[in-house]
Image: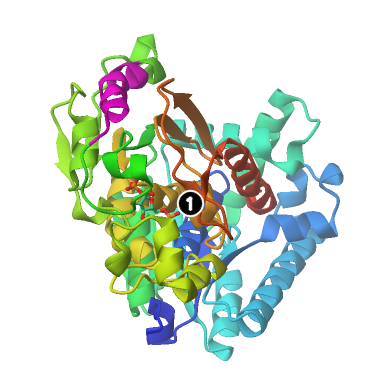
Amino acid sequence: MPVYSISHIENVRVCVVMVGLPARGKSLIAQKIVRYLSWLSINSKCFNVGAYRRALVSAKGVDATFFDPRNKVGLEYRESAADAAIEDMMKWFVEENGVVGILDATNSRVERRERILHICRANYIEPMFLESWSDDQALILQNIFDVKTTSPDYVDKDESFATHDFLQRIEYYKETYQTMDKARDVDLTFVKLINVNSQIIINRIESYLESRIVYYVMNLHIKPRCIWLSRHGESQYNLTGRIGGDANLSERGWRYAKKLPELVLNSLGEENKHTNLTIWTSTLARTQQTASFLPYKKKLQWKALDELDAGECDGMTYEEIEAKFPEDFKARDDNKYEYRYRGGESYRDIVIRLEPIIMELERQENILIITHQAVLRCIYAYFMNVPQEESPWMSIPLHTLIKLDPRAYSTIVSQMKADIPAVSTYKERGTSQLGESSISSYASKSRDLINNSLSLAKK
Ligand SMILES: O=P(O)(O)OC[C@H]1O[C@@](CO)(OP(=O)(O)O)[C@@H](O)[C@@H]1O
């Protein structure tokens, strides 16, 4: 049975038009929306006008005066860059079946927004304005710091020059900035985030897809926090290469469970050792046994964190599956993300059931999730932007604690091995044998993926 995504059902295409002064976190929000929607298989892409502007005018020759509204040449270049980005986006909607395009720019004047509105309507695309408004100086300064340390506009520039120049750029934008206005913009679809999500104004949200985007941005917070991920300790089933089931831990699995509190403390570091973590496990015995020595009060079980349901293959080894269902075995190797076990699940099914978990994770602070190989791959893929055809093939070894430290423009990954041996449960494509592999090389590769796309999108 084909799996339809939200966009297939509604046949809606949305252009999210970012609005706001520089250093209001627009690029970060835009990138997060793209990552979230792509994870849900909704074809989305960010078009950053800053990158188009840099293609037209070398970043080297651009300082704050370029953004002075009285600088006619600067204005022309900026409008041409916006037009080129919009044109490419419209092409992408048609040629690549785009569903959600994000126009990442200040779009700070009504005149520009009306032009975009007109183009969208002429192309049957729903425009949705997403404004990030802020007067929180600490937040703005943090954003300026992020911008000047990563923006191509300030490569090789002295730090104090970059800060001063960027502040001046913001002042120029303020001269003509027109915020979304409840009275003037009453007929438009818009969301206005005030100081991240202290207050949110929502106007005329019409489609389900738009409401998903709104709900997602409403849940974003910017408090620093970490997420720890671990598979359960080695189980009795892992020892014999059997998949699924609800087996207990092996003797070595129990040793990992006892060691886990120490691994977590080491990863917190001396200064944060009293940090309170919330523990999430699946409803299966092996994850709960693994969590049983952790000295934290709040432990929640989620059915949505249960391992991939292998249906008729539950309890079998990969060799047994290959012998009994050779066609299925091959079909799974050919397309592991889409393949659904007879009477069971596919990776795509897991992503769908994990969506509320991801939403809740965005709202929460420090969480340790103890779950299973397939589920962990899907969660990791969300944070690290791993393409869906690759995520089911990542190897996430047993007896390893993974720490994700989400920063403004990337997520830092570290791994702590428990030094307790365990079998490998990693099956390479094209064989039924289990072997060894590691996510470490993928961690840096996917981090680079994120960094590359962000540096393109940043101003
Ligand atoms: O998708 P593949 O690579 O088969 O990995 C998922 C499998 O991992 C296993 C171990 O082989 O997870 P777990 O150890 O959490 O039980 C199986 O139960 C599950 O079917």
Q: Is residue 127 left or right of residue 212?
A: right
Position of residue 225 relative to residue 241, above or below, is above
For the question of whether residue 100 can be seen, the reply is yes
Tag 1 residue: 381
The verdict on residue 341 being magenta is no
Q: Main secondary structure of the magenta part?
A: helix
Which contiguous range is marked in magenta?
249-265
What residue is drawn where x is 58% and y is 88%?
Answer: 123
Q: Is residue 420 left or right of 22 when viewed as pictured?
A: left
Q: For this rendering, which residue is in front, 17 or 137?
A: 17
Query: What amino acid is labelled 1 in the image?
Result: Ala
For the point 75% across and 37% down, the residue is 154
Task: Please state which of residues 109 and 424 is positioned toward the viewer in this rendering.
Answer: 424
In the rendered image, residue 389, in percent from the top left (x then y), is placed at 55, 63
Q: What residue is rendered at 22% in x and 47% in y? A: 282
Label 1 sits on a secondary structure element that is: helix
Q: Residue furthest left?
A: 297
Which residue does the image show at 35% across and 79% down from the upper left? 207
Residue 93 x/y as whole percent = 61, 80
Image quadrant holding the N terminus, namely bottom left
Does residue 176 appear to the left or right of 79 in the view shown? left
Residue 392 vs residue 447, the one in the foreground: 392
Q: Position of residue 348 (x, y in %)?
A: 41, 67
Residue 369 on image: x %, y %: 30, 39
Query: Quick check: can you spot residue 178?
Result: no
Is residue 264 shown in magenta? yes
